Amino acid sequence: MALVSDTESSSNEVTSAVEMLADERDLYIASRALKAMGHPLRLKILCILAGASEISVQDLVERVGTSQSNISQHLSILRDKGILDSRKDANKVFYRIGDDKILQLMGTMHAAFCSPTTG
């Protein structure tokens, strides 16, 4: 029977603690993103974005069918939670899903839940 030295045991505990922290961080990020995605209008926006590389705010307004100020509020929330990235080109702002994990999740959700008229 092999004995584990104090150094090896301590090293294993540190590695385990670091892995746990990484998992906790990932869980927090996922929880925060899912909470932000939980609003029907934000989910509709994400369904549209999942089917496009990027889209302008005006195009989203037309496709979603609500006011520009309402769309902008929801886009701001999604951007602040790290779900969306934006870029400005002259007087237009374009949005895209900026996180690869969210993009993968939305691809699955898009296939399962987003109707052809939504995305």
Image (tube, grey):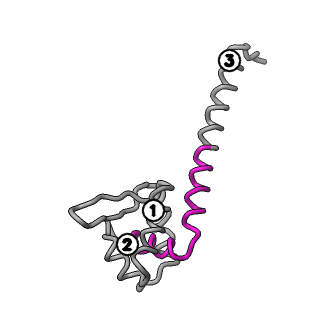
Callout 3 secondary element = helix
Considering the image in quadrants, where does the C terminus appear?
A: bottom left
Mark 1 or mark 2, earlier in chain: 2
Packing grade of label 1 (10 A; few <14, some 14-19, many >=20) is some
Q: Read off the residue under disc 3.
A: 8
* Image disc number at residue 21: none
Q: Horizontal and vertical percent for residue 56?
A: 31, 70
Q: Please tell me in which quadrant of the rendered image residue 39 appears.
A: bottom right
Number of marks drawn: 3
Indicate yes or no whether the magenta region holds residue 68: no
Q: Horizontal and vertical percent for residue 59?
A: 32, 77
Furthest-right residue in view? Answer: 1
Q: Is residue 111 visible?
A: yes
Packing grade of label 3 (10 A; few <14, some 14-19, many >=20) is few
Distance CA(mark 1)–CA(mark 3): 48 Å
Magenta span covers which residues?
25-50
Distance CA(mark 1)–CA(mark 2): 20 Å
**Mark 3 belongs to which amino acid?**
Glu
Mark 1 or mark 3, earlier in chain: 3
Indicate yes or no whether the magenta region holds residue 44: yes
Disc 1 vs disc 3: which is toward the camera? 1
**Mark 1 belongs to which amino acid?**
Ser
Give me the residue at 44% from left, 66% from top.
75
Q: Please tell me in which quadrant of the rendered image residue 10 appears.
A: top right
Furthest-front residue in view? Answer: 69
Q: Horizontal and vertical percent for residue 2?
A: 75, 17
Q: Read off the residue under disc 2.
A: 51
Q: Read off the residue under disc 1.
A: 76
Above or below — where is 12 with respect to 104? Answer: above
Q: Is residue 107 visible?
A: no
